[in-house]
Image (cartoon, rainbow, N blue to C red):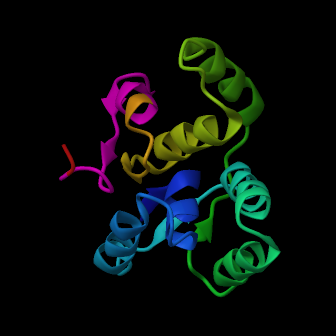
Amino acid sequence: MILADSDFWIALCNRRDRYHGFAAFALERWSDEGFISTWPVLTEVTHLLNARIGIRQTLDFIDAVAQGACTVAQLSDGVPMRMVYLMRRYSNLPMDLADASLVLLAEQLGEGRILSTDRRDFSGYRWKNTHPFTNLLLQDVD
């Protein structure tokens, strides 16, 4: 499964987003492997879609999730303490709750492939303190 960040979903849902084409291509290219995300990411997506685009796209997104567009991970015990640690460690970026949840998910799955438009943050974050993320969405973009 490939981790999916908020901005991937937002770009996918918004045809006017500058990364929409990349997101649509990634959806087609990687859908056989499946996508996985977290509740903090989905909460962020629905908030931003509703604020930027509208309720129809927000409902379409939630409907797609309900239909299996991605798996919503259940994070393991000890999550709040690890999130606090990560958010403090990366406070210079700063790391938000959604990003912290994806780092935890990568650690839980042993998987660092991600779809994100956030080059700066996900090139700096490390899962299990040492492993870099591989951003499949922007890997061919200079």
Say left or right for 127 vs 90: left
The location of residue 112, given as percent across then percent down, is 37, 45
Residue at coordinates 54% horizontally, 53% vertically from top-left? 7
The location of residue 85, given as percent across then percent down, is 65, 18
Indicate whether 33 appears above or below 100. below
Q: Nearer the viewer, residue 57 or 34?
A: 57
Q: Indicate the quadrant where residue 81 lies.
A: top right
Q: Is residue 87 visible?
A: yes
Q: Indicate the quadrant where residue 62 lies.
A: bottom right
Say left or right for 15 vs 126: right
Q: Indicate the quadrant where residue 27 lies.
A: bottom left
What is the quadrant of the N terminus in the image?
Answer: bottom left
Q: Which residues are magenta?
A: 121-140
What is the quadrant of the C terminus in the image?
Answer: top left
How many numbered marks appear?
0
Indicate whether 71 appears above or below 122. below
Residue at coordinates 41% horizontally, 59% vertically from top-left? 19
Determine if the magenta segment contains residue 27. no
> Which residue occupies the extreme bottom position in the image?
67
Residue at coordinates 56% horizontally, 13% vertically from top-left? 89
Indicate whether 38 appears above or below 71. above
The location of residue 16, given as percent across then percent down, is 51, 67
Q: Nearer the viewer, residue 78 or 134?
A: 134
The location of residue 135, given as percent across then percent down, is 32, 47
Residue at coordinates 52% horizontally, 38% vertically from top-left? 103
Q: Is residue 5 visible?
A: no
